[in-house]
Amino acid sequence: MAEARRVEIIGIGAGDPGHVTVAAVAALNRADVIFLLDKADAARELSDLRQAILDAHVPAGGHRLVRAQDPERVRTEAGYGEAVSDWRARRADVCADMLAEHLGPGETGAFLVWGDPALYDSIISVVDDIRARGAGFEVTVHPGISSVSALAARCGTTLNQVGGAVQVTTGRRLARGWPTDVDDLVVMLDSREAFAGFADDPDVHIHWGAYVGTADEVIISGPLAEVADEIRETRARARAAKGWIMDTYLLRRKPGSV
């Protein structure tokens, strides 16, 4: 009987090698193969950040690196759910081929995930899809420090107010309006700058961060009415300079202001 194969899904934080947990370091050092999915718009820079994390925590030569191109996702308003499902299926095809070709009996493979694998990342679902197709391997997930946690720490704040609810959402959903009974909103994946729709509300405060945890980190905090334009201009400059952007923000309303 062949030895079991293992897959470790490892959250590596938002970019700072110091944010990698002790459990994640142990998992990285168990891996025989590390699988990397490179994004076309920022492949080199993100690849360098991951390599810096590996250099900080894993002895050279202790593993094999296997790279593949992350499939492009169709960006569309119509059929959004179908587009995401299609992208995840194509991502599963790529990862299934990597595992079949490079992960041998008794070996452990690792997928490195920015931030935390459980927060707006698809790898857990992709691996579940591959297993549902009949591939045999054991899976362990290691949580990481998300950009959300890193942003709150850098701003010296909490994500919720006393006794209040906090909701993690997307720019797409925020554009439909502020959710009821929620004073604090963490917003991710906001390509449309949905925060600007609340810039006239004097009771809204924002903590915004881009490239959190990296050398290029930018943080802007303040009343949204005062800093919304600064955030939009800073975001546009950063995206133009680097060709990509990873940002998130916390919107906070005074309790009872609505």
Image (tube, rainbow, N blue to C red):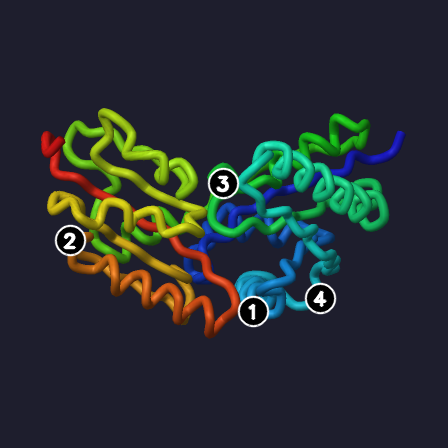
Residue with the mark numbered 4: 61
Q: Earlier in the sequence, mark 3 or mark 1?
A: 1
Q: Quadrant of the N terminus?
A: top right
- For label 1, the SS is helix
Q: Nearer the viewer, mark 4 or mark 1?
A: 1
Q: Nearer the viewer, residue 78 or 82?
A: 78
Report the Cα–Cα distance between label 2 and label 1. Answer: 32 Å
Q: Earlier in the sequence, mark 3 or mark 4?
A: 4
SS assignment at label 3: loop
The answer to which of marks 4 and 2 sits earlier in the sequence is 4
Q: Residue at x 21, y 53 (%)?
A: 156
Q: From the viewer's perspective, is the residue at label 2 or at label 3 nearer?
A: 2
Q: Which residue is mark 2?
A: 223
Inspect the image, locate mark 4, and give the three-letter code of the amino acid beneath it: Gly
Instruction: Say whether marks 4 and 2 touch (CB < 8 Å).
Output: no
* Amino acid bearing label 2: Pro
Per the image, the residue denoted by label 3 is: 120
* x and y percentages locating residue 2 in the rendered image: 87, 34
Residue at image position (70%, 32%) is: 138
